Structure formats: C-alpha cells, structure tokens
Image (cartoon, rainbow, N blue to C red):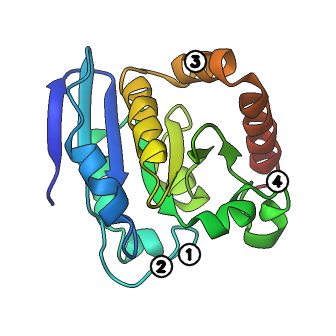
Amino acid sequence: MLMKISGKGRPHRLFVAGLHGAEWKDTSDILLRMTPPATGMVAVLPVIDKGDYLSTLDPEYYHDRGALIPEAIEQIGPDVYVELHSYSAGNLAKLTDRGRVDRVGVPGFCALEDGVLLGSVSPHIQRDHLSSDTLCLSFEIQRSNERSRTFAIRMLDVVKECGSKEDFLNYVLEHYPVQAKKAIEDYRAFQNSL
C-alpha cells in the first residue's frame, strides 16, 4: 500500500483520493502536496483504483477495488476520514439534488465555493469500518476547474488541522452557515432512516 504519513500522535487523519476511474488525475496530486499538520498526523492514500468506475455506494466497492481503505482505517484508526473525488460540471445538479437520497440512497452534496461540494462518505465505509466519533467527509472537486482545485486545497488544509467533528462543524457553521445547516439536517435525517 502506497501511503504517505506526515506528523505524529493524535489526532489521526486519513485522506484518500483516486477512488475510481480517472479521478486520480484531478485529485491525487492535491493529497501528495499536503504539508504536515500542526498537531497529530495525516496519512494519505493518493490513488486507490485507476480501473473502470465502480461507485463507493456499491456494497462491493470497499471489499473489491477499495479494499485498501478498510486496511488503512484499521492500521491508522482515524479520528478524521476524508475522501476526495472529482466530478464533471454536467453532473452538478445530480450531485446536489435534494432528491438524491431517494434516487441513489444518500443525501445530495452541499455546494461550498468554486465548484467544491461537501458531503459525507458512503454508508458502507462509515457504518462498517469507522467509529461513530470519526469525522467523515467527502469533497467533490469540479474537473478542469483550477479555482475548484485551489479552494479544495484550502478546505483540506482546514480539515487537516481539525481533530474532531466539533472542530470542523464550528468552522463550517461560521464560514458556510446555510450549507452547514442543510448538510447537518440531511445527515441526521439520513442516519435516522438507516
């Protein structure tokens, strides 16, 4: 497993990218350029799978192509877990649609800035491999959008310094209150429906 680790001690953070298809072309270098956190450690898996697209919402994903992720989770024991994905601009409406939970089984993403979307990770990895105390985030960046990449880097720098759910929630509630409230409501409703 090609994992880059920087820093030491708690909190432990695990950031993964290149989860399926050609996403790695847009996301992997972002993680490889991350600097060490001020406290704790960050483990980075920059490329999980370069094969044909298989959704992380597919129950087999984390047992098949994404099997490196549960292995890393077991090894690292993350307090913070982040997946970095990319999307085509034409899919923005599908990803942020309020009806996404009925259509594909998970809430729609919240649009932050410059085409960067925020959501949670697949319930398969969250429920089966992560602690309920783990901050679990999924960021989607828009392909071929340099502003999206730049903003994603800034957001990952923020998350890299977070040690808990509360740290991130405080940040996002202060800087993006409308999106944060929507994300929290959607997440709670989704968790209650499981």
- Left/right of residue 29 with respect to residue 89 in the rendered view: left
Q: Is residue 136 above or below residue 154?
A: below
> Few, some or many C-alpha atoms within 10 Å of disc 2 (few <14, some 14-19, many ≥20)?
some
Residue bearing mark 4: 193
Count of labels shown? 4
Q: Is residue 73 above or below residue 179?
A: below
Q: Earlier in the sequence, mark 3 or mark 4?
A: 3
Tell which residue pokes out farthest to the bottom in this image: 52
Residue bearing mark 1: 58
Residue bearing mark 2: 54
Labels 2 & 1 near each other (Cβ < 8 A) = yes
Helix, strand or loop under label 3? helix
Q: Earlier in the sequence, mark 1 or mark 4?
A: 1
Calculate the distance from the C-alpha at mark 1 to the C-alpha at mark 3: 31 Å
Question: Is residue 39 visible in the rendered structure shown here?
Answer: yes
Q: Earlier in the sequence, mark 4 or mark 2?
A: 2
Mark 1 or 3: in front is: 3
Helix, strand or loop under label 4? helix
- Three-letter amino acid code of the residue under disc 3: Tyr
Q: Is residue 188 above or below residue 158?
A: below
Quadrant for the N terminus, please: bottom left
Calculate the distance from the C-alpha at mark 4 to the C-alpha at mark 2: 25 Å
Residue closest to the eye, 90 or 69: 90
Helix, strand or loop under label 2? loop
- Three-letter amino acid code of the residue under disc 1: Asp
Q: Residue at x 16, y 31 (%)?
A: 6
Q: Earlier in the sequence, mark 3 or mark 2?
A: 2
> Few, some or many C-alpha atoms within 10 Å of disc 1 (few <14, some 14-19, many ≥20)?
few
